[in-house]
Amino acid sequence: MNAPSPSPDAALWREPAPLVLASTSATRRALLAATALPFETARPEVDERAIEARALADGASPEALAVLLAREKARAVSRTRPRSLVIGADQTLALERRLFHKPTSREAANEQIAALAGRRHALHSGVALARDGEIVCDLLASAHLTMRPLDEAAIALYLDLAGDVVTTSVGGYQLEGVGAHLFETVEGDHATILGLPIFPLLAALRDLGALAL
């Protein structure tokens, strides 16, 4: 009787301890799951706004802030998961030097979209890998998006169509949904836009010897 073949995910992962994603984001989980890697998730217990405030006071750029937040998330979870490689990820949206966060209401989303309309902004996705509380590598990938000029009526219609989803994403839009109608051009990898740059992440895991492929 033949032994059962190993599952594809077990064949891919070389580490003895599980890979851990330090995120509760359903989008990041789906992106990582699509790679067929076995992984677990954990919530990173960090005060993002406090870290951001200190970093900005020190003059950190939006790009540096994305990587810093990813590092802090990875480090926090890795302290509780001995031997595991832990992925931390974060994303900043910058209109020149202005940073945007998830809008807390329809009114806040309206204000953000009005500010972005007709202009080109950047999404900076930072990723860090940690083990036993120490960062082993980090990376940054960026995308640039140009939003169409939009009048008040167009923004109101978008908000009606998108519903509560506008408060779940920085900038008040999700490109994978009705938010696609807001844009003229998109420059960058789709996974980077969604907050987890898969190809650079897989390259980093290969460099660490964690992947068989």
Image: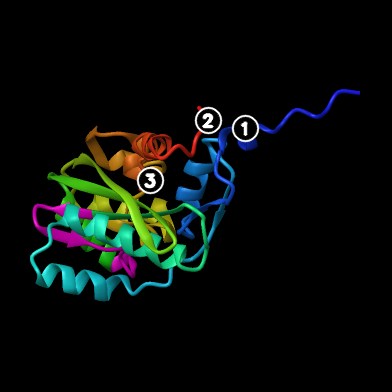
- Residue occupied by mark 1: 11
Q: Is residue 104 magenta?
A: yes
Left or right position of 141 against 117 = right
- Residue occupied by mark 3: 196
Mark 3 and mark 2: span between their CA atoms?
21 Å
**Closer to the camera, 207 or 67?**
207
Q: Earlier in the sequence, mark 2 or mark 1?
A: 1
For label 2, the SS is loop
Q: Is residue 39 visible?
A: yes
**Closer to the camera, 185 or 96?**
96
Q: Which mark is residue 212?
A: 2
Q: Earlier in the sequence, mark 3 or mark 2?
A: 3
Q: Report the residue at 17% width, 48% height from top.
A: 117
Mark 2 residue type: Ala
Depth-wise, is mark 1 or mark 3 nearer the camera?
1
Q: Is residue 179 visible?
A: no
Q: Position of residue 172 (x, y in %)?
A: 31, 56
**Which quadrant of the figure contains the N terminus?**
top right
**Closer to the camera, 201 or 206?**
206
Q: Residue furthest right?
A: 1
Left or right position of 3 against 102 = right
Mark 3 residue type: Leu
Q: Position of residue 130 (x, y in %)?
A: 39, 56
Callout 2: few (<14), some (14-19), or many (20+) C-alpha neighbours within 10 Å? few
Q: Which residues are magenta?
A: 93-107
Are the residues flagged by discs 2 and 1 in contact, CB closer than 8 Å? Answer: yes
Q: Position of residue 186 (x, y in %)?
A: 24, 34
**Closer to the camera, 117 or 54?**
54
Callout 3: few (<14), some (14-19), or many (20+) C-alpha neighbours within 10 Å? many
Q: Position of residue 194 (x, y in %)?
A: 37, 45
